Amino acid sequence: MTGAGIEITKDLTIPKLFVKQCKKYGKNKVAMREKEFGIWIPFTWQDYYDNVKYIALGMVSLGLKPGDKVAMIGDNRPEGLWAEMAALCAGGVAVWLFQDCMMDEVKYIIDHSDTKIFVGESQEEVDKALSIKGECPKMKNILWDDPKGMRNYHQDFLMSLKKVKELGRELDQKEPELFEKLVEQGTGDDVCLLFYTSGTTSLPKGVLLSHWNMLTMGHNLMAVDPCYDTDDFVSYLPFAWIGEQMMSISCGLQVGYTLNFPEGPDTAQENIREIGPHVMFAPPRLYEGMTRQVQVKYIDSTWIKRKIYELATKIGYKAADLKFDKKPVPLSQKVLNWFALIIMQKKLKDHLGLSRLRHCYTGGAAMGPDHFRFFHALGVNLKQIYGQTEIAGISIVHRDGDVKFDTVGTPIPETEVKINEEGEILSKSPSVFLGYYKNDEATAETLVDGWLHSGDRGFIDEDGHLVVFDRSKDVMTLNDGRPFSPQYLETRLKFSPFIEEAWAIGDKREFITAVMCIDYAVVGKWADDRKLNYTSYPELSQKPEVYDLVQKQIEEANKDLPVPAKINRFVNLYKVFDADDEELTRTSKLRRAFVTDRYKDIVDALYSDADVVHMDTTITYEDGREQRIKTDLRIQKLNI
Amino acid sequence: MVHGGQIKEGDTILKLEDVHMSFGKVVALAGVNLEVKKGEIHSIIGPNGAGKTVMMNCINGLYKPQKGDIYLKGDRVNDLRPFQRAERGLSRTFQKLELFGGMTVLDNIRLGRHIHLKSGIVSGSIYVGKTKKEEVESRKFIEEEIIDLLEIQSIRDKAAHMLPYGLQKRVELGRALALNPELLLLDEPLAGLNLEEVEDMARFILDINEEKRWRVTCILVEHDMGVVMDISHRVNVLNFGVQITDGTPEEVQRNPEVVKAYLGEDDLYSTRR
């Protein structure tokens, strides 16, 4: 059964579809699995239904009314999904927070969203909620599901999900029809999600999405790339990211594929390999991580393995280029492809958990062409998704056999995309959001006559593919007056396994410069092999040898660029950009305005004749502690 | 005093009376007394060379004191060998890691469980009935109680010597817990750990001490005064084999002799930023 089989009407809601699917599959099919205590534990659709039903009724007992907000935080686990689905079934609105949100963000979102019930995972999340309870009077109940460390918490408003389910059971005995009645109440135009976008410039904005938005989005994506109810999907990216909602809720529910939850965030990679998913959607960061892992292992392996890898990769790149150019594949190449598959690709794909993959998507941020080609050379059908939270996550996707690595593809059904006079990408579809919560001004700016203004600059190429240039406000002007995308340069730099983050500077300047963040593990290993002593990231980053290493990577990225776009000078930063320091958004996009302000001294020094810049700053640890850092950073110039 | 078998919370679980231990002419312990109550975290502190580890080894049975008596749950255990004491619910970790480096984390932990496995070679090799049940129970215990508690899911199949030091310490604690002990000797569990690892380890110690499932009595030898003063119920101070005092953390902190033994540091918390 494919997802396209479900007809989406204005009356259909996610809970109605949920109940329908539960009845259809019942006890005969596994809805989700969670790896716990070293074993994959299955939950059938009947288990899914029972859990959601009683949690929903329990929430009603606690006083949840239609339209009330329920906030969730925690790792991906069945309980998190049940709580979300329960909130929706009770007529509530789901709000998800990123697991690593700092206190201020949690407070802002809980307060701004008028959250009534907070669902955390364990002590850590409960502590977060408790510390803001005083400042968020609208928050009435705090729920949790993992009893670890909860032995000394006895407040009345704290409750375990187990207890909530008991409340639900009691209510069900009193009013057996209530759950079905609640589910029947909603219509497609009701709000189902309130999602906070991680703004690159300002405070997060609350995006209101309706059931109709979410369901049409899933429906239209499935129309392009059908999935089957025998498929497996691994849910391990934050539920607070719209892409995960799209796969786990919208598509997952329509198709009925099995969701798999890893044991913990640090076992995810291993668990993916065990499952071997058929479909995957992840931000570029993840694919970049995989590429880096392969590149590093390659450097570490024996001579013969390296030669085999090189040979297979060469064949792979040839095949990928034929595919990109849409040229027919000659028989000789087919034989070589098979050869490459046997000697290397099959094994490598297995290690990365990509063996059974039919489609995999990247989205949420820009991905460099080098990474893209890398995966296609491996024979992985990687495709770009483009969209915003405001359009339920997706408006554009690559089609099979029509993948171009510098574009993001063509619109999904029922979606129109156009470029306005300023070069901004506008889109229109049934999935366009209802508006920002409590922010009419921003809604009016973003949503004009049903067209969603993305704030991205781009164009449509001769094949009808959308090319996303960059965020409009980030586009730089080179010294010869041409526009230039810093993101493009940065993604190219990040193809090097030694570079974790990069920041290209040079809007209306004489030349381009860059601030580089080395990858501690990879460069650390490289330094160990060369017997270079270092004790910390700041020290390692400032080694002359490391500067030369980074310079080599920059020269590689500079190679095919016009002279004004080449990086002239760079500096190695003493730390990696981090979302906790507000330098990145929670989805790992660089917040340019913020870093420009924060590292003003570095930028100034890069455009002066100075060789060294003195830094004196504080960094914030995850638990909120701060440390002051005083250091000198060297500026290295390249010969262009 | 209660003898053998089950003892209640608050009863004496371990008692040392006038224990003397010397190596040649070096006196390591000169008449030490200690009384540990069930359910407590009892810390032993003292400068380097004070005799803390010697005391641990005496309790554990690695050393045999020349004079004095050691009672475990009311029974005199001076003549029992270490494994016999382990059978009575005594477990320990080591200051210097004593893991089996080439074995996986899981195998190391399983080893701690060995004492509870009753099946022999024959039934073990055919793996039926009781043996199977025992194995399943043991697996359940290790996975659900230990690996989950210590959050080491991601390393269960890694060889122990490949792991960073902080994790190896955690595995050692896991192995000690696999014995399902009543009394746990922790010999410097925080030494060499970074701040984050110290916080984690302190939390694990509190968990196994307070969680209903465990309620393990702990004897903690440690130099990190911040943690010792925060989590201990009682503190025993040794200096060159002589016991200076034994009392609550507050009493100990006020004791002028303790302050002097620690080289005149005014603030015991200053050992860690």
Image (cartoon, coloured by chain):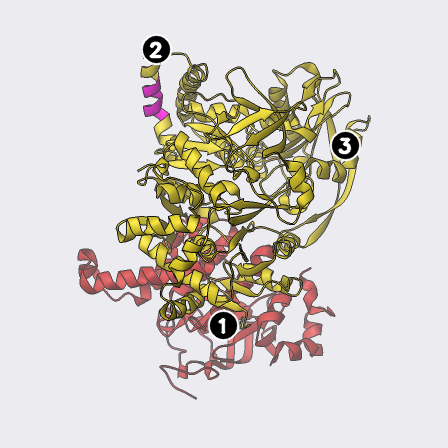
Chain colours: A yellow, B red
Residue A435 figure quarter: top right
Question: Which secondary structure type mostly characterizes the magenta part of the structure?
Answer: helix
Provide the residue span drawn in magenta: A337-344
Task: Say what secondary structure mark 2 lies in.
Answer: loop
Q: Amino acid at mark 2?
A: Pro
Q: Chain of mark 3?
A: A
Taking A18 as reference, is A61 left or right? right
Q: Chain of mark 2?
A: A
Q: Amino acid at mark 1?
A: Glu
Q: Nearer the viewer, residue A496 or B173?
A: A496
Tag of residue A330: 2
Taking A123 as reference, is A112 left or right? right
Nearer mark to the viewer, of 3 and 1? 3
Q: Within 10 angstroms of label 2, few (less than 14), some, or many (20 or more) residues?
A: few
Circle 3/circle 1 CB separation < 8 Å: no
Q: Amino acid at mark 3?
A: Val
Mark 3 and mark 2 lie on one chain; the one further toward the N terminus is 2
Tag of residue A603: 3
Residue B104 is situated, as x and y percent measured from the top left of the image, at 38, 50
**Is residue A172 shown to the viewer in this render?**
yes
**Is residue A200 shown to the viewer in this render?**
no
What residue is shown with label 1?
A: B210
User: Per the image, is A339 magenta?
Assistant: yes
User: Per the image, is A229 magenta?
Assistant: no
Image quarter where the N terminus of chain A lies is top left
Q: Within 10 angstroms of label 1, few (less than 14), some, or many (20 or more) residues?
A: some
Image quarter where the C terminus of chain A lies is top right
Q: Nearer the viewer, residue A539 or A519?
A: A519
Q: Nearer the viewer, residue A205 or A442?
A: A442
Identify the residue at image location x=59%, y=63%. A139
